[in-house]
Image (cartoon, rainbow, N blue to C red):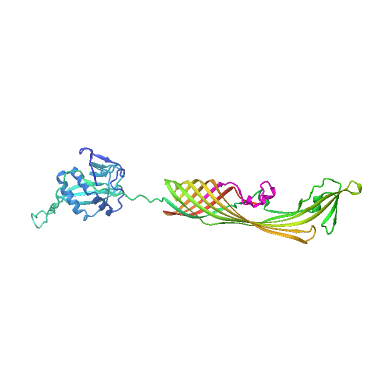
Amino acid sequence: MVSVLFLVFGLFSQTIKIRELGRLPLYGFVKDADTARQVVKNELEAVGRAFYLYDREKSDDVFLDLGEQLGKVAFYERLIQPGQPIIFMLFKDKQGERRVLQNVEWAGEGPFLAFGFKIASQGKIYEFILPQRCGKICLLAVAAILEKPKEPEKPNPPVIKIPEPEPVIPKAPVTPVIVQPVPASNPKWQANVKVKLGYVFYGNELGWFGGEGFQELNEERDFENYLGSGFLRWCNGHEYGFFYTGRKDFPYRCGSSVELFNKRTIFVVSERQWPTIGAEVRLFKGLWVGVDFYTRKMTADIEESRSLMNFREVKYKGLYCDGPTHVYFMQLDRSLISNRYRFNVDVNEFDLSLRYYFSAGRVSLAPVLGVAYQDLVSNFKAEFKSELYYPFDETLKCSDDSTVNIMTKSRKFAFLAGAIAELKAMDNLRFGVEGWYGKFPEQSLMPKTSGIYHGDDASQAYWPKIKTDRCRLAVFLKIAI
């Protein structure tokens, strides 16, 4: 309850002309007669105080009669034409205080629609109206109750008057009226948390040192091409031989090897992505903080086959028949190496980001900046098989098999930048599309501790790696709570 002070604007001899409605409403738009009746009931004490300022002697009686008759009288619609005088008008100022204007005239460009009702008190009829647009309570007119006309056959009929109702409650004291304010409507519901479930589409994150052209290699060379110009004579089933050449600087020594063929094939590359979960929390107005979790698995298998001709013994025998031809003795064997490598990589990623939403109707757009933490676990398995043959036939001399298993872990951070588009399907249901770009440190999946990796060896260009540049597109279903 609040205490309301009524002020009277203008003098009784001065007419206040009103040219528009709705600037300082008492209630707002009055849609029907029931709403108008409720407005008067809520403002009953304020109307009594306003009437006191108009007619102190009759204000108590009119106040009591208005309270008794309000629930019974009929409300009706009527048009108020320009030039219509109004005795007083009850409204609220900008601070919500009730105010009264007296001696008012409607001076607008055209009529306005109002809901009206009448009550009887102390031998008079009081007509009140409420403009539909603003709900201000106005005393429009006061008229005396007409006597019943005399019947011609009965001279001097008694005059029937409406009896004055007896007061049933004591007169209201002349004190500021306490008015119960109309309760304000509840503010519009606003979500502060979003829980989301989605799926992320990645480009292929597995790359190759040296470029994509090194994914497959198939090279083959003839042994005699390595020896250069000269004549080779084999003995004992090509196990050893003599090489006749005009060069004394023979390029190979005992323990040297030359590659007859080298074939590498990447025959399985797969990446598997699981659904993504995340949440967003409002910090201030359109500023939100988001947390997302991603997990995926990548697999690559590589097969390598190599054939080497090995120089077991190399000796210089001198000049052939004291001529310009040099003679070299060579003992050879041939090794066939078949290796298989498998890389299983599990990647778990947490993203923390800030996003600011700009909304237009049901569509929202947001720029995003954040940081990503990536936990990578790589399991490397290598199967080695080596077979030793005679130089130029398929007779097996011996073989050797071995296996290496190595697990490596790494943690990486990267800055992310992107954008979000969001469609509001319902109050608590949204669909979102997110695009990101980030640059992570480059990392090879071949562990250096395997004894295979050589950082300065260009032939290792086919080893897989995690790409440094990463683009991502995600779709989400979001539930706002």
In depth, the one of 12 and 202 nearer the eye is 202
Is 317 left, or right, of 268 in this rendering? Answer: right
Is 386 left, or right, of 79 in this rendering? Answer: right
Say which residue appears at 78% left-offset and 52% top-offset. Answer: 311
Determine whether 240 is above or below 370 in the image.
Answer: below
Say which residue appears at 25% left-offset and 50% top-offset. Answer: 42
Is 155 left, or right, of 288 in this rendering? Answer: left
- Residue 201, image x, y percentages: 55, 54
- Residue 106, image x, y percentages: 27, 43
In depth, the one of 361 and 12 nearer the eye is 361
Question: How many numbered marks, from 0 up?
Answer: 0
Is 73 left, or right, of 372 in this rendering? Answer: left
Rendering quarter of residue 296: bottom right
Does residue 455 show up magenta in the picture?
Answer: yes
- Residue 51, image x, y percentages: 19, 45
In depth, the one of 88 and 276 nearer the eye is 276
In depth, the one of 295 and 362 nearer the eye is 295
Rendering quarter of residue 152: bottom left
- Residue 293, image x, y percentages: 50, 52
Say which residue appears at 78% left-offset and 56% top-offset. Answer: 333
Does residue 24 show up magenta in the picture?
Answer: no
Say which residue appears at 77% left-offset and 53% top-offset. Answer: 310
Numbered range of the magenta stretch: 434-462
Which residue appears farthest toward the bottom when viewing the image?
A: 395
Determine whether 235 is above or below 5 in the image.
Answer: below
